[in-house]
């Protein structure tokens, strides 16, 4: 399962779990979420993906 950590100034603020497993749907979901996170936390936001077994 893929999860995405929202990192602001080197600190993990949130973890996002996409609902669907299809890459095309994950991509559109993450584009939407990246815009929301930039509005919420400012411009210093990084999104790091990782696998959870």
Image: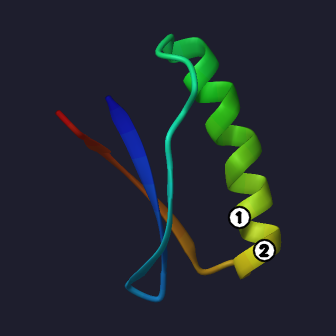
> Real-space Cα distance between discs 2 and 1?
5 Å
Q: Which residue is mark 2?
A: 40
The quadrant of the picture occupied by the N terminus is: top left
Relative vertical location of residue 45 with respect to residue 31 in this rendering, above or below: below
Mark 1 nearby-residue class (10 Å; few <14, some 14–19, many ≥20): some
Quadrant of res 10: bottom left
Query: Answer yes or no: do the residues labelled 2 and 1 have beta carbons within 8 Å?
Result: yes
Q: Quadrant of residue 19?
A: top right
Indicate the secondary structure of the residue bearing disc 2. helix
Tell me what residue is drawn at x 70 percent, y 48 percent: 33
Q: Label 1, on which residue?
A: 37
Label placed on residue 49:
none
Residue nearest the viewer, comparing 46 with 1: 1
Assess disc 2: are there few (<14), some (14-19) or many (≥20) residues with their C-alpha within 10 Å of its C-alpha: few
**How many circles with numbers are drawn on the protein?**
2
Between 14 and 29, the one nearer to me in the picture = 14
Query: Measuring 77% from the left and 55% from the top, which residue is drawn there?
Result: 35
- Residue drawn at the location 57% of the way across and 25% of the way down: 26
Q: Secondary structure at mark 1?
A: helix
Q: In this image, 25 relative to 37: left or right?
A: left
Residue 34 point in image, percent of width and height: 68, 53
Say whether residue 40 is left or right of residue 5: right
Instruction: Identify the residue at horizontal 47%, vertical 89% (top origin).
Output: 9
- In the rendered view, does 27 fall on the left or right side of 1? right
Q: Position of residue 29 (x, y in %)?
A: 68, 32
Question: Where, quadrant-wise, is the C terminus in this rendering?
Answer: top left
Q: Position of residue 7 (x, y in %)?
A: 46, 73
């Amino acid at each position: 399962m893929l999860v995405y950590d929202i990192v602001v100034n080197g600190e993990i603020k949130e973890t996002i779990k996409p609902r669907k497993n299809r890459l095309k749907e994950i991509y559109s979901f993450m584009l939407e979420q990246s815009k929301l996170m930039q509005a919420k936390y400012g411009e210093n936001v990084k999104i790091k993906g990782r696998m959870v077994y």
